[in-house]
Image (cartoon, rainbow, N blue to C red):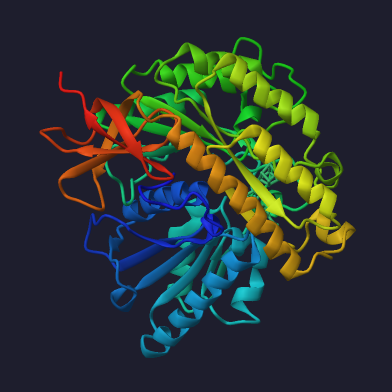
Amino acid sequence: MLHEGEKVIDENRQGEAVMAPVPSTGSGRKLLLESYGCQMNFSDSEIVASILTEAGFTTTRDAEEADVVLLNTCAIRDNAEQRVRARLQYLRSLKSKKPDMVVGVLGCMAERLRDQLLEEEKLVDLVVGPDAYRDLPNLIETVDSGQKAVNVLLSREETYAEISPVRLNSNGITAFISIMRGCDNMCSFCVVPFTRGRERSRDPESVVREAQELFDLGYREVTLLGQNVDSYKWNLTSKGEVKEEGKEVVNFAQLLEKVALVNADLRVRFSTSHPKDMTDEVLHTMAKYDNICKYIHLPVQSGSSEVLKKMNRGYTREWYLERIAAIRRIMPDCAISTDVIAGFCGETEEQHQETISLMKEVGYDMAFMFKYSERPRTLAERKYEDDITEEVKGRRLQEIIDVQMQSAAMRTQAFVGKRQRVLIEGVSKRSDEQLFGRNSQNTVVVFPKGNLVPGTYVDVDTHSCTSVTLIGTAVQS
Ligand code: 5AD
Ligand code: SF4
């Protein structure tokens, strides 16, 4: 989820650390939980918080007073890992003064590096992969008894379905709901299938229940999370056959509808869609319900069909553009965002220009743009040479960013003068007298406070904008 004022262009989206304190429930030891990386990691940290709160841990934001420090890490690009390593070095120096402090690595780096962090680098006491969080209390006990502890087993079933996440750093208005785990796609650049394992979908009933509980607590927006939400399936095999006769079959469009029906005042977002799998059925469901936000994150990665083939993305430039046309046909007002990789193995200047031309043609509302970073064990690492120099990657990325900045500014400008339905999220960072929220398309809207309160909807007449923010006045009812 983006936050007010966050840059449209954020090369380090996956690497930003946010301190996530665990609410205290007992008189146990003090835990500091820090999350790095994608939305899924932040959502996982809420599950970890739930498991450890149950086990009696209390919370702190301060590493100096923590008894247990857990870093929930990201391995998607090398710079994300470097940031965690720097933090681990600091924790090691702290630990030399506090030998009883337990330091653990969770998430994708844990899965990728396993024993290396424990043995070769001696940076941590505890290494726990994304499917082993239920084991955390036992593993911490093992460390207490003077041993190192590892559990990086990946599971085909674990979805943490019945664990009620402890909402961390919450504004009490927007929340994530994880609907599936893992990924079966094997894009050649991506480490996720190795770190998060096979794809599995969560019981739709537990998803709907979580949405209802959030609504009852006053939340007004949920984001359904999965690496590839379009391949969500319940009671269906990967070939599309019914697994258990007599049991309900649910695909992503149907799950989306179920969540939308929880309450018309609960906004529903989702991420991430995959261009090869996104169906018209999903688009029609989105169009049918006002409370399903008109925003699709549809990562393209490259505008060149040859590069896409090497990336093993399963679609061509033409297919992708047809999916964009379908979105525009079914929901003309839908915002579209993307992910782009600059300088993938062997990318020629012409192929890079194809990415630029595609971006101009689509006119994205927003994009996350990255330099290609080779990841160990991936198909690309084994098959192709990472032969584009840092300098060329940097130059291509900058060209991509320049196109995107123009397109984002145009998209924001296009809302000016139009009335926007806004879910109010809080007080603007710039002024206590202003509130901010988002329209359905996820654009931030800022307006004078009056007597309005966060967590409610308001219509705002927009009169001007910056490159990514709309400015207006609330329509008094
Ligand atoms: N190098 C650069 N970017 C990557 N991504 C995934 N793997 C890599 C990599 N090895 C980007 C993709 C993906 C987003 C989450 O991160 O654009 O959609
Ligand atoms: Fe990685 Fe591709 Fe799966 Fe996304 S769809 S997580 S890029 S393998």
Which residue sits at x=15%, y=45%? 433
Which residue sits at x=28%, y=66%? 60
Q: Residue furthest left?
A: 451
Q: Residue furthest bottom?
A: 97
User: Considering only vertical position in the picture, is 327 above or below 406?
Assistant: above
Lateral position of residue 399 relative to residue 96, left or right: right
Query: Residue 76 placed where, x, y %?
Result: 63, 57
- In the picture, residue 239 is in which quadrant? top right
Query: In the rendered image, is residue 373 in sight?
Result: no
Query: In the rendered image, is residue 338 in sight?
Result: yes
Q: Quadrant of the C terminus?
A: top left
User: Considering only vertical position in the picture, is 22 above or below 233?
Assistant: below
- In the picture, residue 27 is in which quadrant? bottom left
Lateral position of residue 265 relative to residue 91, left or right: left
User: Considering only vertical position in the picture, is 224 above or below 52?
Assistant: above
Relative depth, front residue between 268 and 405? 405
